[in-house]
Amino acid sequence: MAPSAHPRAMAPARPGRTRTAPPQTAEGWYAQPRMRRYLLFDATGLVYLLLGFLMLRVTWALGSGRVAWDRVLANFENPLYVAFHLLSLVAVVFVAVRFFRLFPKAQPPRIGPLKPPPAPMIHGLLYAAWIAITLLFVTILCGGLFA
Amino acid sequence: MVETLRHDIVIVGGGAAGLRAAIAAVEADPRVSVALVSKVYPMRSHTVSAEGGAAAVARDDDSLEMHAYDTVKGSDFLGDQDVIQYFVEEAPRELTALEHWGCPWSRNPDGSVATRAFGGMTTKRTWYAADKVGFHMLHTLFQHSMRFERIVRYDEQFATKLLVEEGAVRGVTALDVREGVMRTILGRAVILATGGAGKCFPFTTNGNIKTGDGMALAYRAGVALKDMEFVQYHPTGLPGTGILITEAARGEGGRLFNSKQERFLETKPEYGVGSKLELGPRDMISRAIIREVQAGNGIKGPYGEYVHLDLTHLDAGLLQKRLPFVLELARTYVGVDPVTQPIPVRPVVHYMMGGVDTDIDGATELPGLYAVGECASHSLNGANRLGSNSLTECLVFGARAGRHAVDFVSGVGGVDEGRLRERADQEAARVEALRGKQKGGEKLVQLRREMNQAMEEGCGVYRDQGSMRATVETLAQLRGRFADIALEDPSRVFNTELIAALELANMLDVAEAVAIAALDRRESRGAHACSDYPTRNDQEFLHHSLVYFEAGGPRVDKKDVTLGTWEPEERKY
Amino acid sequence: MSDVERKTFVVTRFDPDRDEVPKTQSYEVPCQPDWKILDALNFIKDHIDASLSHRWSCRMAVCGSCGMNVNGEPKLTCKVPISDYSDTIEVAPLSNFPVIRDLVVELEGFLEKLEAVKPFILRAKELSLDEGTTRQTPEELEEFKQFSMCINCMLCYAACPVVANEPEFLGPAAIALGHRYSLDTRDEGAAVRSEIFRGEGTVFSCSYANECSEVCPKNVDPAAAVNQAKFNSVIDWATRLVLPRGGEK
């Protein structure tokens, strides 16, 4: 086993009176499909980070006049730029689907007398909200682009 | 030099009885310090595997008198009626206390605690938590015990000997499983709560840890073991593994069928269960199944013959709600789906009615020594225990002994620790000599197997004088051969082979007591069915058996049964 | 008996008095087809190598002793059939725990975390036995029942990537058991536990990997408990901003 867990993982406050081997992590854990999906899920954070910067740049450009705006728009001529945005679309969908799948069980069983709706309904509401918000933004953007 | 730790009360065993005693002790007196010494972490105690329920009067159509009578009759009139009376009175209070501590009892729609039918009970009085009552009770007790700083746990410490000085018990020596060193844990009272000894037998519902350690400790210290011949065979264990399929499966409506698809408890009144059918007492049903197999009506399988427990006529939703664990066990361990197929079952050793001889307070003849739970015999269960009485028993007498011990220790003075230290050092040397003892001709696994076989042959559901005598001789030989055992593992840290050897020594002592007591009881009563003496003989044998450890071989004696409201009568259902 | 299959078990061994680090040892075991992994380990101990140390007891998946890594995945070895595996099976101690010996891991760390969440009924005023049992409807019982099924086998700790990296994290089982009491109608300590859940070992370290629930042999779904606990902790914190509580329980 490869000891790549934190050396004090699950260590008690008062260590036992015999020497222990450090916590091990299963060898090849990164090869398990479930682990890989989880790592991908966490790795999308990088994508969001980058997207965040780009969004900030776009917003700044909006307020900085025609020239700045045209410069930003010109980026979309670059195929790499477009590719990144397509990749981030995939990442967003991946994260959303996974998050939606896990969302119902994170609901408290009851708040006062109110119970959460059954899982299929929660899924329906989440996807419906997602689609509605997407359509709204697309409309605004397209409207804005072709204004 | 062996390290010495000092507490007021030492409890050996961390299951339901031990935990309940610990909680009772610190609640009775918050200054008392309690050592809870267990060879496994408490949540691993075998209480955890109990499935069906715990009995206490709860409904309006029930009464303490009815519960007491059912228990007396179930015990085949060998139970002490003063003990039984106290038990039925305290039972509802104990289960209520557990409810207050968070135990997730299953409920009726109106929010009251639900009860189910159980073997030998005239009405529904078994409180249950789906079909994992032992698990829920144990975890509730364990988690509740975390509130008390005065309960100090010594986990994975194997108690090897009781220290007795000036005629009273003063503590225990214990082997630290992890560190491989011996320690002395002193206490002015010791409460044994170590469970039964099903692992003396080859087929048992019991887990690996049920090796009669506390019984052996008391026995070797000169305390009698009472009613050891009464070993309960649970009628419905899985063939091969012996895994328990709870009586609650029959309580919810399960039926037993033989190879001819005959519901034999119904078609053959000679089995004595009367109208109770599958809810008759366990000893009668186990005997019925064995007789069916002997008559050629058993279904053949790779692990011997069995009968069918049929739940297929019950609603699948009900099975999922009330018996989810049974469904899981059958699917995982015999590949059978009880919703659509019958479950293969056969009688397996489950519980020891006998144990360390105590009075109603759980106190033994040795001052300062108590015993509670399955390792004790107060005697609540007499010759046969009713299902769902034992979990309640752990609570009722665990609490009583815990409180009594608190009173006891307040009157106990100090003792010369020098002599105790000498004894402890001797004991440490003895155990050290056993570790990795390579010089010897006997193998641990072989001795264990021969013991198991001897117990199966001589102390089965049906016994006869000839095979019991042979078993007594075999066990005496095995005890002698143990001295010549060879062990392979000389390691210090977490040496489980050494633990297994200590457990085997305990089992050999306890097994011998069982066999000798069985040989001596020349009648059939409760779970002890002797084919040479097929009837109950109240004239000569209405007494408890006592077995004392002596150098030349165990000595048998007797003790009166405390009768009360009910005189012995024919046990008919 | 028929159908005996020989399988090779590659088992981690470690004796702190002799070994610097854990190593593996291979055993050829003649297996019955209906065996679980535990049966093979017991065969090794009984007939091949008596020095192999492992914990086990009930062999019916309820005591939680026998958790180990089998081919890299945390499993209850008394529940997993060898027929699920091919000819070579790796058995190692549970990930993320210090190793005491062979397949035996240190459990004290878990017990400290469990005690930290106050896993018992907290009430301002203790219930009296004379009041009898409290009323709790089957629906109220269902709300926390699932989380009470935890057998403390710690497979979830072995699977959790956060446990692997953050020693303080309370972990799935401890949080699930704390949350179980907070949901119990008899308990009044939800606010106390919410504060504990925001403290050291915070539930917010959970990154929603869901590995714990994937490996749990009892369908406790600790991921649900942890994430519900997050939600409740936030509500509790916000409520306290608006309505600070006077006096402790």
Image (tube, coloured by chain):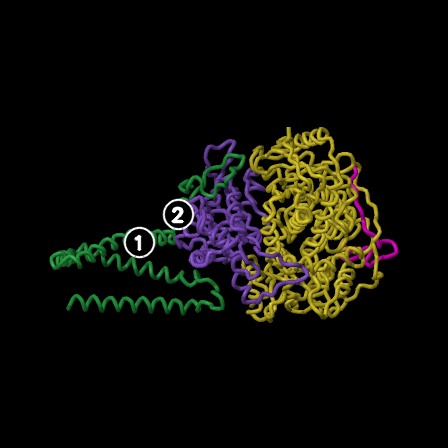
Chain colours: A green, B yellow, C purple
* Classed neighbour count for the residue bearing mark 1: other residues with Cα under 10 Å, few (<14), some (14–19), many (≥20): some
Q: Let me know if residue B243 appears in the view.
A: no
Give percent across and percent down for residue B337.
Answer: 55, 64
Q: Which residues are magenta?
A: B525-550
Q: Is residue C180 above or below residue C48?
A: below
Q: Label 1 is found on which chain of the structure?
A: A
1 and 2 marks in contact (CB < 8 Å) = no
C86 or A107: nearer the eye?
A107
The amino acid type found where label 1 is placed reads Thr
In this view of the protein, can residue C193 be seen by the observer?
Answer: yes
Q: Is residue A130 above or below residue B41?
A: below
Residue A104: x percent and y percent?
Answer: 42, 63
Residue B307's quadrant in the figure?
A: bottom right
In this figure, which residue is indicated by the disc labeled 2?
A29
Residue B365 point in image, percent of width and height = 79, 43
Is residue B538 one of those drawn in magenta? yes
Q: Chain of mark 2?
A: A
* Numbered disc 1: secondary structure: helix
Could you say which disc has been placed on residue A44 in the image? 1
Name the residue rendered at 50%, 31% in the picture. C18
> Residue farthest to the right?
B539
